[in-house]
Image: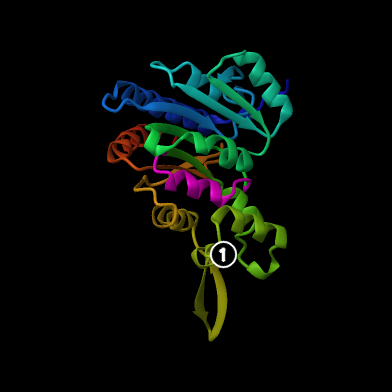
Amino acid sequence: MQFDEIGYWSEVKLDIIKDYARAYSTIMASQRNPAFYHMYIDGFSGSGVHISKTSGEFVLGSPLNALNIAPPFKEYYFIDLDGSKIAELQRVVGERENVHIFEGDCNEILLKSVFPNVRYRNHRRALCLLDSYGLHLKWQVIQLAGRVKSIDLFLNFPIMDMNRNALWRYPEKVEATGIERMTTFWGDESWRGAAYRQQALFDTDEGKTATNIEIAKAFQKRLSDIAHFAHVADPLPMRNSRGAVVYYLFFASQKPVSLKIIKDIFRKYRDRGR
C-alpha cells in the first residue's frame, strides 16, 4: 500500500477535526429527551493512515481518529473513490456492524445512501467531513448537508486548485473544463462575480482577480444564504511548507454552541507553525 504523505498543516487539520469530533460526540451522547443518534461521515476517507512529511512516521487519518473517540459515534460512513485505499481501510477496520465502507463517488453515495439516514425528525445527527484537495465536490452535496438541518460540516475549500484551473487573471483564456469544475463546486456561475471585478485603467477595462480570502468570504456567505447553514465560522487558512494558502477549512452548523466550540478550536490552532 502506497500511503499518502501529508504536510504539517494537514496534521493540524486532523487534530482540529479530532478535537471537535470528541466534543461533538460527548454532547450528542449526553442528550436525553430526546436522545440523539449521531453518526460520523467522511466523503474522502482515504486508507485511514498517512505518513508525516515532518517526522516520517505514520499518522492516523480521519476514519481511525473517529473510531477511537469516546464516547463513540453510533454509526460511521467512510467513502473513497480509490479502491486500493478502501481495501486497506476495510482491512484495518475489520468487520463492524456500525461501520459502512463504500468504494465510489461520494457525490452520488452521500445523496443516495448516506444523507437520507440523517433525518432531523428522527433525532438523527451527523458530523460530516468533505476533505477533497481539488474541485471534485458538487454543490448539491454541500447544499443538502445544510438544508437537512441535522449535519455539522467540515469542508475543504480548495483555493489553490481553483487558482490553477479557473481563477485566472484573464478568464477568457481558462479552459472549459476548469470553468465547468468551478461551476459544479460553486453551484452556479455566480463565482464569476465573486472572483472578478472591473477597474478603470487609463480609459480601458482590465479584469482584476479578487484575493483568495475575498473569494472564500463570498463562499462563506453562500453557505449561509443558499445552503442555509445558520452558523458558518470564518475559514481557517491551511498552508504548505512555503507558507502559501493551499485551501481554507470551513465549518458550518445549525447550532450556536457548535460555532462557539469550533471558534475556540480554530483559535487554538490558527497561529501554529508560523
Which sits in the foreground, 274 or 20?
A: 20
What residue is rendered at 45% in x and 21% in y?
74
75 relative to 206, above or below: above
Q: Is residue 249 left or right of residue 187?
A: left
**Horizontal and vertical percent for residue 43?**
57, 35
Mark 1: amino acid? Glu
For disc 1, the marked residue is 189
What residue is rendered at 42% in x and 52% in y?
220
Answer whether residue 193 is magenta in the image. Answer: no
**Horizontal and vertical percent for residue 47?**
64, 24
Q: How many marks?
A: 1
Residue ranking furthest to the left:
33
Quadrant into which the N terminus falls: top right
**Horizontal and vertical percent for residue 206?**
57, 76
What residue is rendered at 39% in x and 23% in y?
22
Magenta residue span: 135-151
